[in-house]
Amino acid sequence: MAELAKELLGRLSKKPQATVLALYGDLGSGKTTFVQELGKLIGVDGSVQSPTFVIMKRYTPQDARYKFFIHIDAYRLEKPEELTRLGWEEVVNNPENLIAVEWAERVETILPKDCVRIHFKFIDETTREIQVLQ
């Protein structure tokens, strides 16, 4: 997972809005582990925890490319508009933000068209299949 996160970070380029990573996959497929690896690589102090109940967490990374690293868990959302009420427009329009959205299929209609889509599939306890679409 660390290698994938490192490779992906190396390929990301600045955009006129936030860089959004849309993460898809069932429970246990590796989405949160991937986000935790991203957090380590960009220098987030402490550990990155899944924001399942608070929906969105904001971290300040040491990596100068990003002002904020925003981790969103959309699992508990009924509709995309719920994310809008949490300030989605503000965070997605800031080009200094790196945003990782778990359960992206639940908010698909408000994701930027050019977001990076990453699909995770559980194969067995030690194996995941991961497909990155840019």
Image (cartoon, helix red, strand yellow):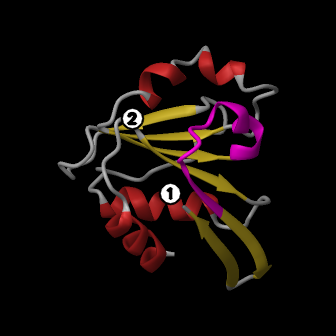
Callout 1 secondary element:
helix
Q: Is residue 78 left or right of residue 19?
A: right
Asked whether, in this view, residue 49 is left or right of residue 58, the answer is right
Where residue 8 appears, as percent x and y from the top left, is 42, 68
Q: Residue at x 41, y 60 (%)?
A: 38
User: Which quarter shows the C terminus?
Assistant: bottom right
Q: Amino acid at mark 1?
A: Val
- Image quarter of residue 60: top left
Disc 2: which residue: 17
At 71% across and 33% down in the image, what residue appears? Answer: 109
For marks 2 and 1, the one nearer the N-term is: 2
Q: Is residue 111 magenta?
A: yes
Q: Residues within 10 Å of mark 2 (few under 14, many from 20)?
A: some
Percent x, y for residue 112? 56, 38
Residue 78 lies in magenta, yes or no?
no
Where 31 falls versus 132 (above or below)? Answer: above
Nearest to viewer (mark 2 / mark 1)? 2
Q: Residue furthest top?
A: 85
Identify whether 39 is placed above or below 96. Answer: below
**Residue annotated with mark 1:** 35
Pick whichever, 85 or 14, lies toward us: 14
Amino acid type shown at disc 2: Gln
The span shown in magenta is: 103-118
Asked whether the beta carbons under mark 2 and mark 1 sit within 8 Å of each other, the answer is no
| Res. 107 image quadrant | top right
Q: Residue at x 50, y 57 (%)?
A: 35
Q: In percent of the image, x 54 and y 48: which residue is there? A: 115
Q: Is residue 129 above or below residue 73?
A: below
Q: Position of residue 29 (x, y in %)?
A: 72, 67
